[in-house]
Image (cartoon, rainbow, N blue to C red):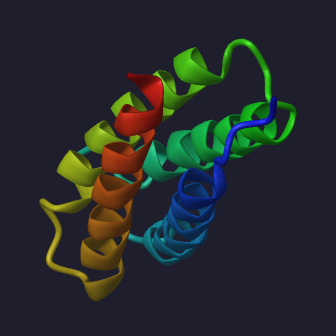
Amino acid sequence: MIRNYETCIQACQQCLIDCQNCLTKMAPMESHNACPNCCAQCIDACLMCIKFMVADSPFTKEACKLCADICKWCAEQCQQHEHDHCQVCAASCLTCAEVCYQYAA
């Protein structure tokens, strides 16, 4: 039976979009932490998580846990910047992490 992953897929998609925006805007800027590198890793994690959910993979729980951990880390990094795009990214990452942790449980 295929589980209902719609909420998690939507959270991952929004996080991917907001991380891509943050990554693009931060690329030419100087950063004192892992932003924008965390955004690049978060994009990959969200994409991987979406793929696992769509495939109803037996490893979806593990993918969601990893995605949540990376999103949480990315949020911590982006929250340290005052840029609007970083704050939006951080909020999106926290939402995605919260939803992914629920599916990982």
Spot the residue most to the bottom. 84
Left or right: 48 with respect to 20? right
The x and y percentages for residue 42 are: 51, 44
Image-quadrant location for residue 48: top right
Say above or below: 10 vs 97.
Answer: below
Q: Nearer the viewer, residue 74 or 62?
A: 62
Left or right: 24 with respect to 22? right
The x and y percentages for residue 67 are: 49, 34
The residue at the point 41 percent across, 53 percent down is 96
The x and y percentages for residue 30 are: 32, 63
Q: Nearer the viewer, residue 18 or 52?
A: 52
The residue at the point 51 percent across, 61 percent down is 11
Q: Is residue 37 visible?
A: yes
Say above or below: 81 vs 61.
Answer: below
Spot the residue most to the front. 1
In the rendered image, the quadrant that contains the C terminus is: top left
Say above or below: 70 vs 62.
Answer: below
Say above or below: 56 vs 59.
Answer: below
The residue at the point 54 percent across, 39 percent down is 41
In the rendered image, the quadrant that contains the N terminus is: top right
| Circle count | 0
